[in-house]
């Protein structure tokens, strides 16, 4: 019997391999993966793909209440395509992309159509590699320079002042540090002058950064950079005129060049653009921080009353916040130094109602099991992320200790989850959220709320979901952290595209496009489109060159409109803020007026990735739309998914941000119980 099984496996395997260039097996039009599933049944457990494996020992460790909750979910522990009845349940299987694209390079199948590498020379490949390597390195280098500009500029100014004063007091005597060709040989003089010349230029450039950079101007205003630039320029000129002989003219030219460049940047940065299609130049926030809500909605008013003020106040240093200088540092430093504890998850799969795909849901339970009274959190992670993301994991660890169950939905195709058709992840898809939350909603207790939480890209998707589905959502509340409500504003967010998006784009291309779905992108895009995609320097360019064409959007503005909770509305754009609400009835506000559950938007005005402009230009007008279920908590500082605390940000991690989410959710829960 064992030999007979082996022979059958050999026959099936040979048949499959001989037809790998077809998307369907010729017999009965059965998808190839169904054939592979037949092979899987004859394999050892270790040979199965990860989405078809179940660790029963891990599941057996769950407390009885957690096990009972999982049974109520009635979701499979493996991907639905691993189940015996998949073909019977879905009579119209989707086409499966050619899984053998890499093999085809060697068999010369589709070479000319799909692989530009066969026709382009080595020069083109080198250019592509440079596009993939240089932008992230340049962005990272510039970020570090901008980060330390607040230290470099005053330090250099102090050194220059000390040098000038010291030289002045010793002008009548020999000074070993004084550069004089009569006292030292030319080589030594050149070396010392060059050192002070480079130091002067560095100080002036650091001062110019503080004068012209959005983050510094928003934090300290123009005066700080202006004073530092004036001091470093004057001291550099004084030093050059009084002591330099070899680098005198070069220093004066450098001073003029830096001052001219700074003046030019200041002049163009003062332009104001009212359209989302225009360059915002110096992107300093023009809206005020604070808590915005509609006083016409009694539930939201009560939520605000129950929400402890200390839990929603990001107090400046030393009262709470970290002394880090700008939104760049408040974003980057937490990601570099914070570390979340380990968290164990149990995975189930939620079948999509619109196609034959499924998304994974990673569940975390308290040690004593599932509670049918505590809030259950439904979490959407950021771009390139998953349940392993540090800030997601930290949130889960904190909430589990409080007795809540946490459910992290893995966006389709991310975090090593499979996609079998062409419909891979994009930011405008909200149907997966609707389907996954429906399964969870049906398993909850009568007085239990399902609270949605979204971070970054997850926040964008959560906001869009609540706006699109309105009263049909399966969530009882939502909180979006560092997302955006109007992504059209990001199209011209050049600072974000130059400094932060190159790193994200590199990861997106490597992990999402090339490692997982290269074959699919090659088949849907032309050779020119795919080559342009590989040379994308920012997430915005990835969207323009790949995501839009691959998914059939008209253009990038169409894609960003579909991704945005505000949608096509122009009611919240710059220049519209003073228009009376009576002149804009609710149907002109777009789908965001459909939000029907308590929804809080948490955003820092110094967010360097997702501009404050994506919040709309009139927060009070926005929260008054529809039935008034929207609340906005805007902080002056915090960065992107940051909000670090204290002198040692690592100690507290993402405590403020994650506790703000839970305290809002608890306030909603209490307010709803009071209503009952």
Image (spheres, helix red, strand yellow):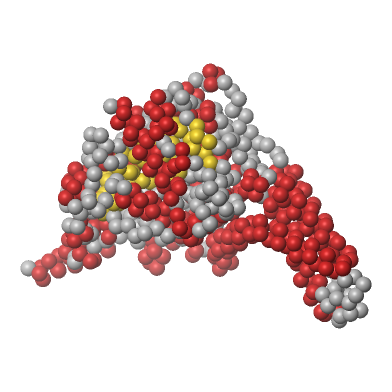
Eyeballing the image, is 379 above or below 585? below
Q: Nearer the viewer, residue 105 or 452?
A: 452
Work out which quarter of the rendered image holds the C terminus and state it.
top left
Is 181 placed left or right of 480 in the picture? right
Task: Give the total number of marks visible in the rendering.
Answer: 0
Eyeballing the image, is 596 above or below 607? above
Work out which quarter of the rendered image holds the N terminus and state it.
bottom left
Is 8 placed left or right of 652 in the picture? left
Q: Nearer the viewer, residue 45 or 239?
A: 239
On the image, the x and y values in percent for residue 567 come to 48, 33
On the image, the x and y values in percent for residue 259 come to 79, 53
On the image, the x and y values in percent for residue 100 come to 35, 61
Residue for point 46% across, 33% down: 631
- Where residue 3 sits, quadrant-wise, is bottom left
Q: Nearer the viewer, residue 233 or 213?
A: 233
On the image, the x and y values in percent for residue 109 come to 39, 62
Residue for point 83% across, 78% down: 176
Looking at the image, the residue that sits furthest to the top is 582
Is 571 placed left or right of 377 in the picture? right
Residue for point 72% across, 53% down: 208
Residue 87 in view of the camera: no
Q: Nearer the viewer, residue 166 or 599?
A: 166
Residue for point 16% across, 50% down: 64
Residue 650 in view of the camera: yes
Looking at the image, the residue that sits furthest to the left is 1
- Where residue 126 sits, quadrant-wise, is bottom right
Is 341 placed left or right of 322 in the picture? left
């Amino acid at each position: 019997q064992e030999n007979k099984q082996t022979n059958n496996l050999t026959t099936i395997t040979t048949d499959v391999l001989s037809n790998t260039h077809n998307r369907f097996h010729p017999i009965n039009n059965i998808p190839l993966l169904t054939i592979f599933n037949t092979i899987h049944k004859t394999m050892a457990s270790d040979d199965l793909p990860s989405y078809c494996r179940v660790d029963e020992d891990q599941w057996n460790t769950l407390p009885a209440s957690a096990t009972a909750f999982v049974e109520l979910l009635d979701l499979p522990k493996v991907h639905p395509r691993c189940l015996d009845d998949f073909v019977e349940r879905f009579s119209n299987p989707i086409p499966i992309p050619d899984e053998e694209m890499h093999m085809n390079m060697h068999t010369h199948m589709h070479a000319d159509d799909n692989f530009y590498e066969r026709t382009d020379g080595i020069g083109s490949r080198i250019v592509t590699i440079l596009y993939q390597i240089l932008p992230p390195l340049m962005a990272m280098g510039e970020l570090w320079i901008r980060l330390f500009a607040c230290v470099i500029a005053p330090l250099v100014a102090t050194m220059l002042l000390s040098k000038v004063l010291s030289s002045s007091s010793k002008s009548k005597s020999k000074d070993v540090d004084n550069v004089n060709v009569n006292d030292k040989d030319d080589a030594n003089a050149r070396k010392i002058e060059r050192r002070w010349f480079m130091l002067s230029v560095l100080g002036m450039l650091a001062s110019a950064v503080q004068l012209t950079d959005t983050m510094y101007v928003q934090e300290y205003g123009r005066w700080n950079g202006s004073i530092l630039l004036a001091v470093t320029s004057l001291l550099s000129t004084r030093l050059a005129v009084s002591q330099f002989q070899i680098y005198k003219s070069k220093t004066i030219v450098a001073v003029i060049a830096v001052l001219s460049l700074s003046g030019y940047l200041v002049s163009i940065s003062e332009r104001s653009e009212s359209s989302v299609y225009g360059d915002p130049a110096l992107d300093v926030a023009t809206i005020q921080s604070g808590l915005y809500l509609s006083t016409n909605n009694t539930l939201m008013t009560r939520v605000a009353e129950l929400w402890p003020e200390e839990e929603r106040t990001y107090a400046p240093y030393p009262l709470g916040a970290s002394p880090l200088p700008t939104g760049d540092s408040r974003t980057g430093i937490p990601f570099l130094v914070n570390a979340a504890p380990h968290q164990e998850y149990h995975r189930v799969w939620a079948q999509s109602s619109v196609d034959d795909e499924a998304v994974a849901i990673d569940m975390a339970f308290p040690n004593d099991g599932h509670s049918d009274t505590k809030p259950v959190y439904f979490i959407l992670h950021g771009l390139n992320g998953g349940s392993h993301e540090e800030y997601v994991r930290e949130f889960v660890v904190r909430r589990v200790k409080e007795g809540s169950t946490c459910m992290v939905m893995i966006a389709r195709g991310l975090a090593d989850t499979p996609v079998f058709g062409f419909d891979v992840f994009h930011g405008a898809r909200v149907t997966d959220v609707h389907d996954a939350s429906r399964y969870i909603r049906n398993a909850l207790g009568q007085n239990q709320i399902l609270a949605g939480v979204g971070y970054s890209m997850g926040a964008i998707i959560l906001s869009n979901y609540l706006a699109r589905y309105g009263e049909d959502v399966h969530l009882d509340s939502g909180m979006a952290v560092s997302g955006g409500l109007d992504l059209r504003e990001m199209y011209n967010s050049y600072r974000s595209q130059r400094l932060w998006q190159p790193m994200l784009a590199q990861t997106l291309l490597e992990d999402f496009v090339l490692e997982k779905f290269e074959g699919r992108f090659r088949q849907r895009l032309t050779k020119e489109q795919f080559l342009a995609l590989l040379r994308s320097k920012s997430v915005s360019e990835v969207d323009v060159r790949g995501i839009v064409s691959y998914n059939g959007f008209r253009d990038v503005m169409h894609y960003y409109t579909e991704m945005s909770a505000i949608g096509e509305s122009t009611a919240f754009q710059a220049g519209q803020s003073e228009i009376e609400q009576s002149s804009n009835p609710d149907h002109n506000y777009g789908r965001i007026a459909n939000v029907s559950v308590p929804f809080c938007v948490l955003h820092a005005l110094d967010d360097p990735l997702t501009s404050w402009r994506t919040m709309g230009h009139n927060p009070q007008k926005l929260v008054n739309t529809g039935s008034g279920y929207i609340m906005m908590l805007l902080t002056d500082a915090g960065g992107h998914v940051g909000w670090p605390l204290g002198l040692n940000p690592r100690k507290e991690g993402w405590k403020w941000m994650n506790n703000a989410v839970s305290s809002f959710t608890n306030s909603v829960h209490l307010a709803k119980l009071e209503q009952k």
